[in-house]
Image: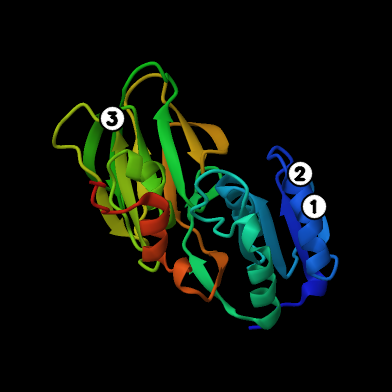
Amino acid sequence: MELNLNNSVIIYNPEIEGSYEFSKVLSKKLENLQIYTLDNMPKDPEFVIVVGGDGTLLKCARNYCESDTPIFGFNMGRLGFLAQALPSEIDTVVNKIKSGNFRVEKRIMLKCRTTGAVALNDMVIRGATFSRTSTLNLYINNVKLCSYLADGLIISTPTGSSAYALSAGGPIIAPSIECFVVVPICPHTLNARPIVIPSDEHIKITTLEAPKDFQITADGQDARIIKNEICVEKHTKYAKLLLLNDNKNHFYDILREKLHWGMAPNK
């Protein structure tokens, strides 16, 4: 695959120290690409390089999924599970991008049918009264599955299964699997467990409590208040992540390196 660098851009997070300075260096190495911030993202570039952290990449992924724009991330933040390259790897990244030594992975996304919000990682639903637990009724394809007495629910994609859903007790799901996982947050019953469902099924959440208001947050960034019920389904568009062709960018390598998955403790 070849990229038209003449129609490619760099988007950086101005809240992260050093991101603009690094973006200027990166631009010069890639034929003077235009540099933008998260607040003035251009329309429909052919390729986007994100300089920031995972949160920066998630915002760009939501913004560019409609135009099928592939995204690559330099990690200037902490973990960097999605924004995988470090600034010290700039020359390797530039060479591989210029030579076409990469692949593009499609990642399924969520869409809230009630508000139109989309998410690459997850949608988190809580009752309007944050200081107490809520009774949340979960329906799959309009069939009631259960009622959770919990602080909230996480609906996660496979990409987001290593984020908030994992911290709340959900399973790790390989990103090539098209499914969703529903994870209760701090449930008040021992039989409340995460459930994995096919991505073509429709999720609805209701409550009988007053007021019948919910807060739904997409990727921890886009928060909205909804009344009565929430409907979530698979988005018709995919996020496209550009990954370099090397061993360390395989999903299982990232699990081991970033999360220290299954490593025995040091003696």
What is the three-letter code of the residue carrying label 3?
Cys
Residue 107 % position (x, y): 48, 64
At x 65%, y 59%, the residue is: 64
Residue at the far top: name it: 131
Q: Which of marks 3 and 2 is nearer the N terminus?
A: 2
Please give left or right for residue 175 compared with residue 55 in the image.
left
Q: How far apart are marks 2 and 1 (CA)?
A: 8 Å
Quadrant placement of the N terminus:
bottom right
**2 vs 1, front mark:** 1
What is the three-letter code of the residue carrying label 2?
Asp
Quadrant of residue 9 within the rendered picture: bottom right
Question: For numbered disc 1, what is the local secondary structure?
Answer: strand
Q: Name the residue under label 2.
A: 39
**Position above or below: 224 against 197:** above
Q: Name the residue under label 1.
A: 36
Please give left or right for residue 197 compared with residue 76 in the image.
left
